[in-house]
């Protein structure tokens, strides 16, 4: 099967077919090139996706990746990054092994095709030239034969005419002979041209054209073989990365299998454990007596001797004790005074003593107010002071000793700080050793440098080491203090049992000792309260009051007398001053007012003239 013998007369069709084959090859090259671009784009998108969800350095997200589920997700992101790299490998291999090679092969193919068809056209032109020569000699032979016949006929006519001279007859005879000779020469030339043309034609159709068409056939077959090999390479490039992609997927599966829910739960405990004990039971206070409340044996007594009942909490029961009370109400309870308001002065003179003796009369209080006053006994006032300290810590800088944190969290922070300082100390010590060695080298080889030039640097590093050591000792002392105060299981049991102890004095002492361990905002203090105040933990209050909005004004008031607010929760006013009312009198004789965003408190209701806004929520109309 040969194109030279089977397609000897299909020169133009073969030319079209080979051009189509090259176009197909170029189309396949374009397909592979677009595939490589898709692979690169896909790899880029995968890398961007992986980078997008990577945890940011020195951020809260980075701390979250200590959990096994987050570690598995991080491993998935890293594996996807490697997965993207394999798609880049696919693109690179396809470009180098297919696109570049085929592009070079196409150029070679075009040159070879051009050369073969150029030879074919040259052979065709040669055959056309031979054909023209044959036609020319044939026409000349035909013309000479006709001329010889006419000359012979003219000679015979002249020879038969008796009126023609002999000279004319001889001339006609000679002319006929010349024409016959020319015809014979043309015949010989035509015969020679015909033989030559036949020979050239035989060589053209049996030698030249088969040879040229055979080369074109081989070229076309190489193109077909090459495109098949490229398709195999196309598949092999993908197949080569399958094992690595499989390893990436295996890595994701392995990371998923490494997720440990128990470990994550333990990490949550370590992250948020406060170290405090749950609050104990609240003791029952008997309010059935008409004028004086019964003080239980386990309640704390007021050191001032005013007979006011105090609420006692056993152990470290200083958590969120009133979850059923709304935030605004709780703040109101924490800040409201616990004594009857002073009577108004006899006159409006500023010289009147506003905080004089209290009125012996006490109006009968409803049960709800008694419950509120029960909830806001003296320990809560101390709690509000600590609450304000906690809020100020949130607004300002974090204390250096992390005293705003619960014990367990404070211990972790201090331990972390100690470790960081030790690392910095070790780094400075290594730098000092390196400077010392360099100084020794300079001493042995003065031409390398001046040893004295390193003294300043060595002194500076030594001072840094000393500062860091002092800093580390300070944090180690705080850490030892915290670790010494963290209760053991036995201590917890003993402190819980203190709630139910029947002896009042030992229980009170124990409670006060425990209260000194932690302030209500979660920090450790050594405050000694002369009033034996029970300190209540308000760590949860910090979180709950962060987003609390101030109470809206429900009216205005005018100060009728000057009042000096010396007790906690009260506010001083000047006679004639206009202020905002944010909470009306609840029956205890106190009205809550506000001067500005930062100053608010309680004043005796009898000291002010209240003008409530009728449109305000919950406002009452005074008659």
Image: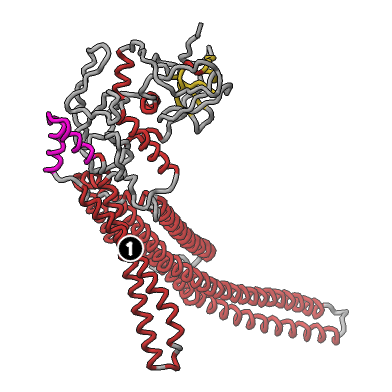
The residue labelled by disc 1 is 421
Any part of residue 24 in sight: no
Element class at badge 1: helix
Tell me the quadrant of the picture where the N terminus can be found: bottom left
Q: Is residue 547 magenta?
A: no
Residue 490 placement (x, y as % from top left): 11, 43
Left or right for 180, reference 549: right
Left or right for 365, reference 604: left
Residue 549 placement (x, y as % from top left): 46, 29
Q: Nearer the viewer, residue 91 or 53?
A: 53
Q: Residue at x 50, y 73 (%)?
A: 112
Magenta range? 489-514
Q: Is 544 drawn above or below residue 122 in the view shown?
A: above
Residue 481 placement (x, y as % from top left): 25, 52
Q: Residue at x 12, y 31 (%)?
A: 501
Q: Nearer the viewer, residue 45 or 564?
A: 564
- The image quadrant that residue 175 belongs to is bottom right
Q: Is 605 drawn above or below residue 413 in the view shown?
A: above
């Amino acid at each position: 099967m040969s194109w030279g013998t089977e397609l000897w007369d299909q020169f133009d069709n073969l030319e079209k077919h080979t051009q189509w084959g090259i176009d197909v090859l170029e189309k396949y090259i374009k397909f592979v090139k677009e595939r490589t671009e898709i692979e690169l784009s896909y790899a880029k998108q995968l890398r961007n996706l992986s980078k997008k969800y990577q945890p940011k350095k020195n951020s809260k997200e980075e701390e979250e990746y200590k959990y096994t589920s987050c570690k598995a997700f991080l491993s998935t992101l890293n594996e996807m990054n490697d997965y993207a790299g394999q798609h880049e490998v696919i693109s690179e291999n396809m470009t180098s092994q297919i696109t570049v090679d085929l592009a070079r092969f196409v150029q070679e193919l075009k040159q070879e095709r051009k050369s073969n068809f150029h030879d074919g056209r040259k052979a065709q032109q040669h055959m056309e030239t031979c054909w023209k020569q044959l036609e020319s000699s044939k026409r000349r032979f035909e013309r000479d034969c006709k001329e010889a016949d006419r000359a012979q006929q003219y000679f015979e006519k002249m020879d038969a005419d008796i009126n023609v001279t002999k000279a004319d007859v001889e001339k006609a005879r000679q002319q006929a002979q010349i024409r016959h000779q020319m015809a014979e020469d043309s015949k010989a030339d035509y015969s020679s041209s015909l033989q030559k043309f036949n020979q050239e034609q035989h060589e053209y159709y049996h030698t030249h054209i088969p040879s040229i068409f055979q080369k074109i056939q081989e070229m076309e077959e190489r193109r077909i073989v090459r495109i098949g090999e490229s398709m195999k390479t196309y598949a092999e490039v993908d197949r080569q990365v399958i094992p690595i992609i499989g390893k990436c997927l295996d890595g994701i599966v392995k990371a998923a299998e490494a997720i440990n829910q128990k470990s994550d739960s333990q990490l949550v405990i370590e992250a948020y454990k406060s170290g405090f004990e749950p609050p104990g039971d609240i003791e029952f206070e008997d309010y059935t007596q008409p004028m004086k409340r019964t003080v239980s044996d386990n309640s704390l007594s007021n050191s001032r001797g005013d007979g006011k009942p105090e609420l006692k909490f056993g152990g470290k029961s200083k958590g969120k004790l009133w979850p059923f009370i709304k935030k605004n109400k709780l703040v109101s309870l924490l800040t409201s005074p616990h004594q009857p308001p002073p009577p108004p002065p006899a006159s409006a003179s500023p010289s009147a003593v506003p905080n004089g003796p209290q009125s012996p009369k006490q109006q009968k209080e409803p049960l709800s107010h008694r419950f509120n006053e029960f909830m806001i006994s003296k320990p809560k006032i101390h709690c509000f002071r600590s609450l304000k300290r906690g809020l100020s810590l949130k607004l300002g800088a974090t204390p250096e000793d992390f005293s705003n944190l619960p014990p367990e969290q404070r211990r972790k922070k201090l331990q972390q700080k100690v470790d960081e300082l030790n690392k910095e100390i070790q780094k400075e010590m290594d730098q000092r050793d390196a400077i010392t060695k360099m100084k020794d080298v300079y001493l042995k080889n003065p031409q390398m440098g001046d040893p004295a030039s390193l003294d300043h640097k060595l002194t500076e590093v030594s001072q840094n080491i000393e500062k860091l050591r002092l800093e580390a000792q300070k944090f180690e002392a705080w850490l030892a203090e915290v670790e010494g105060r963290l209760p053991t299981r036995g201590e917890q049991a003993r402190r819980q049992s203190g709630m139910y102890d029947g002896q009042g004095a030992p229980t009170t002492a124990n409670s006060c000792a425990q209260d000194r361990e932690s302030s209500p905002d979660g920090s450790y203090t050594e405050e000694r309260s002369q009033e034996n105040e029970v300190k209540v933990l308000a760590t949860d209050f910090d979180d709950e009051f962060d987003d609390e909005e101030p109470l809206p004004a429900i009216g205005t008031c005018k100060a009728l007398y000057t009042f000096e607010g010396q007790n906690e929760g009260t506010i001083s006013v000047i006679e004639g001053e206009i202020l905002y009312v944010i909470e009306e009198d609840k029956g205890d004789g106190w009205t809550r007012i506000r001067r500005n965003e930062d100053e608010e408190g309680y004043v005796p209701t009898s000291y002010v003239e209240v003008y409530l806004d009728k449109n305000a929520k919950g406002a009452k109309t005074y008659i």
